[in-house]
Image: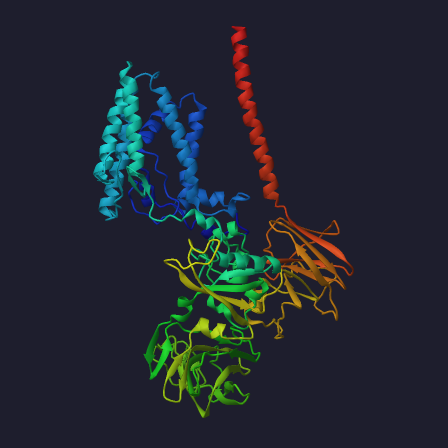
């Protein structure tokens, strides 16, 4: 269940009519999401017979309606049913409507059981079987026609074997063979009343078993299922490297993130991280809360948005992300290309200098620690301006300052129309109103998006330790897209985004390198096949799990996001997350305002997990921030008394703590969990009642008779 789900998210993975063909042709290729659950042609045939017994049987009607509604919901935007259901309380918290097909499957199977039970006692059962067979044949014919006409015959060849090692492809002819066999045996079941009916029933079950085996998307041999990917049982235990990370993070209450995604990472482990009890900022699966994603900018596969590594982005710091784990080959391997006499990294940097919005006129500085290989005689970079149409020719829009290891520096001004220009300079709707000329364009520039090449030749070669890009005051911002350092001998070193960010020693520090895999290094470090090298990098700015801010600022969620990405508050002042907590204007805390205190309280101890956290604080009080992820259902208590909980820093939570020594407790008690428990208990009582009442009713009937 999610915090917020739009209708588009709700219906994102709906079933299509083509997916629905999987109900009769299980070999139809689909996207791999939850799609029609194949129950077998014998079950579908009997379900049709069961529908013919609906008169006077409310149970048949009930399960038929359940199956139909489930299919209509699974079709998503193809019918209005999903739109109506979206307005039902709680229902708008779920996604992947095709999961309703579980109910459709159960309904069809229940109808089939009614049909099977009715065959021996209904009049003219053969006609009912033939009527159901005709309907099923029509559906299969329509599906075949659709496959044939739209060339959707992307029919996967799945192989299987039962008693021999010979293989049969699950194709349309084989499916038609199952259909003919199913109808034939069902007619025999309907007409035979002798012992031969038992043989027919066995054959019918055998056909169903063969049909279901043939529908599997894994290879089946006489030895059993042959799955393409199996993980060894040893993965249930963490490797020695993961165990070290777990112990370090548990003691500090901080987190680790897999830089390139945790879904298949053997160290952070995705879903295995939950089993290993590793505090992962990458999440434990692909389901991420909206607010968490806004704070962390982490993708569905647990991968980190590279822009989150920017020196002015504090999202990872606020989450208490102490360690980054990455494969060294993914960091070091970066493709390059040649353009305008220089070698460049394939992926652009896209580093904004200043607030990326029109009208923002606050000066800003971006500090970079480039990778170097000796003395540098020049640098070349590609950049552009945004929202700078009104900037006059020759206006100083910024500067690039090169700082040497010995503290000396060299500075080069950046001027509009000479060094950099508006990115949309040549666009038809902008060209006539731009007040500066077009600077030297870079090779991949177009009329809609221009990039500009800047070359800075140093007065004297230096060993560059840091590069500062400063934006002056104008109604826009500057973007650094590519950067290359040039040595004395003409050697060139293109700067890639991730190494450029991680080279900042004031924030990042490499702490460990090792080789491992998902199956090795259990219990001890070993050299095994298929191991890959990983590096663990420490984030020195990582926040603790809880702290007390002495200032609370109420701003919109959009402004909160910009403050965390740029480290700049709406009024242009610097955002320091350890000092200032951000809350919504609709939920401002009482007793703490935007004016900072001279002193603040201190967090003495933090303990607890899995929805129960205890924090001991003392001192002058303030706004206690807990970086566990906020969600409706969290409650706070101070010394046992209920306290008002606030959502802070987009996805965290906080509470106002008075001066003195106190114990603050956070507990996750969602009302949906309470209601669900009561509903489950009520359903259990109903089942017990039905189980007890029916036998008692039968005994009373017998006694009366």
Expressed as whole percent of the image width and height from the top left, the position of residue 702 reads 51, 8
Colour option used: rainbow
From this view, report whether residue 540 is shown above or below residue 366.
Answer: above
Residue 110 in view in this figure: yes
**Along the horizontal axis of the image, is 598 left or right of 612?**
right
* Number of numbered callouts drawn: 0
Viewer-proximal residue among 472 and 603: 603
Q: Position of residue 463 (x, y in %)?
A: 47, 86
Q: Picture coordinates of residue 376 (x, y %)?
A: 43, 87
Is residue 604 shown left or right of residue 147?
right
Spot occupied by residue 18 in the image (x, y as percentages of width and height): 31, 45
Residue at the (76%, 59%) spot, across then down? 658
**Is 29 on the left-hand or right-hand side of 70?**
left
Q: Residue placed farthest to the top in the image?
A: 705
Asked whether 3 or 417 is in front, the reply is 3
Work out which residue is located at the far right of the displayed protein and give it. 660
Give the vertical position of 407 relative to 304 (above or below).
Answer: below
User: Residue at horizontal 48%, vertical 56%?
Assistant: 524
Q: Is residue 2 above or below residue 505?
A: above
* Residue 224 occupies quadrant: top left
Q: Is residue 438 shown to the viewer in this render?
A: no
Which residue is situated farthest in the bottom direction here?
459
Residue at horizontal 45 percent and vertical 60 percent from the top: 261
**Residue placed most toward the observer, 325 or 396:** 325
Residue 534, located in which quarter of the rendered image? bottom left
Residue drawn at x 43%, y 27% as measured from the top left: 61
Q: Is residue 634 left or right of residue 470?
A: right
């Amino acid at each position: 269940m999610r915090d917020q789900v739009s209708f588009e998210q709700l219906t994102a993975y709906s079933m299509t009519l083509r997916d629905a063909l999987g109900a009769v042709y299980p070999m139809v290729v689909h996207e791999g999401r939850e799609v029609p659950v194949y129950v077998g042609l014998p079950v579908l045939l009997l379900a049709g017979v069961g529908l013919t017994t609906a008169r006077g049987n409310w149970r048949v009607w009930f399960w038929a309606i359940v199956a139909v509604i489930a299919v209509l919901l699974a079709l998503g935007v193809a019918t209005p049913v999903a739109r109506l259901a979206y307005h039902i309380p709680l229902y708008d918290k779920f996604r992947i409507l095709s999961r309703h097909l579980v109910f459709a499957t159960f309904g069809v199977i229940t109808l089939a059981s009614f049909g099977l039970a009715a065959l021996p006692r209904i009049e003219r059962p053969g006609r009912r079987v033939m009527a159901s067979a005709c309907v099923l044949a029509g559906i299969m014919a329509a599906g075949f026609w659709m496959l044939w006409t739209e060339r959707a015959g992307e029919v996967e060849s799945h192989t299987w074997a039962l008693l021999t090692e010979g293989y049969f492809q699950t194709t349309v002819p084989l499916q038609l063979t199952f259909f003919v066999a199913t109808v034939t045996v069902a007619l025999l079941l309907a007409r035979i009343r002798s012992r031969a009916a038992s043989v027919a029933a066995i054959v019918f079950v055998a056909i169903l078993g063969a049909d279901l085996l043939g529908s599997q998307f894994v290879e089946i041999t006489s030895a059993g299922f042959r799955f393409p990917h199996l993980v060894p049982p040893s993965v249930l235990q963490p490797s020695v490297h993961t165990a070290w990370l777990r112990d370090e993070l548990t003691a500090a209450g901080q987190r680790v993130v897999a830089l390139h995604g945790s879904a298949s990472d053997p160290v952070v482990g995705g879903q295995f991280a939950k089993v290993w009890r590793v505090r992962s900022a990458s999440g434990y699966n692909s389901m991420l809360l909206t607010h968490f994603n806004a704070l962390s900018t982490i993708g569905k596969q647990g991968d980190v948005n590279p822009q989150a590594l920017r020196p002015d982005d504090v999202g990872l710091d606020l989450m208490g992300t102490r360690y980054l784990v990455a494969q060294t080959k993914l960091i070091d391997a970066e493709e390059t290309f040649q353009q305008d006499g220089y070698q460049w990294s394939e992926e652009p940097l896209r580093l904004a200098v200043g607030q990326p919005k029109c009208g923002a006129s606050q000066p800003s500085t971006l500090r970079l620690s480039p990778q170097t290989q000796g003395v540098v005689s020049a640098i070349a970079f590609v950049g552009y301006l945004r929202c700078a149409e009104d900037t006059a020719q020759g206006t100083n829009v910024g500067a690039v300052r090169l700082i040497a290891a010995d503290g000396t520096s060299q500075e080069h001004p950046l001027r509009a129309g000479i060094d950099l220009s508006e990115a949309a300079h040549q666009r038809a709707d902008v060209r006539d109103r731009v007040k500066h000329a077009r600077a030297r364009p870079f090779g991949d520039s177009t009329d809609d998006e221009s990039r500009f090449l800047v070359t800075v030749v140093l007065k004297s070669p230096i060993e560059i330790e840091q590069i500062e890009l400063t934006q002056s005051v104008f109604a826009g911002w500057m973007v650094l897209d590519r950067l290359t350092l040039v040595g004395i001998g003409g050697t060139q070193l293109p700067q890639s985004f991730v190494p450029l960010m991680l080279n900042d020693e004031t924030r990042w520090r490499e702490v460990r390198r090792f080789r491992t895999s998902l199956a090795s290094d259990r219990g001890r470090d070993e050299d095994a096949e298929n191991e890959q090298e990983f590096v663990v990098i420490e984030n020195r700015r990582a926040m603790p799990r809880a702290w007390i801010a002495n200032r609370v600022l109420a701003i919109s969620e959009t402004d909160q996001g910009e403050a965390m990405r740029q480290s700049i508050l709406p009024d242009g002042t610097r955002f320091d997350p350890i000092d200032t907590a951000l809350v919504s204007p609709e939920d401002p805390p009482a007793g703490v305002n935007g004016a900072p205190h001279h002193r603040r309280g201190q967090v003495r101890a933090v303990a607890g997990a899995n929805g129960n956290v205890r924090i001991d604080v003392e001192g002058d009080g303030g706004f206690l921030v807990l970086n566990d992820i906020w969600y409706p259902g969290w409650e706070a208590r101070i010394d046992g008394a209920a306290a008002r909980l606030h959502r802070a820093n987009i996805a965290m939570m906080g509470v106002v703590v008075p001066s003195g020594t106190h114990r603050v407790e956070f507990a996750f008690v969602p009302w949906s969990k309470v209601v669900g428990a009561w509903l489950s208990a009520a359903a259990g009582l109903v089942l017990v009642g039905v189980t007890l009442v029916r036998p008692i009713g039968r005994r009373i009937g017998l006694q009366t008779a």
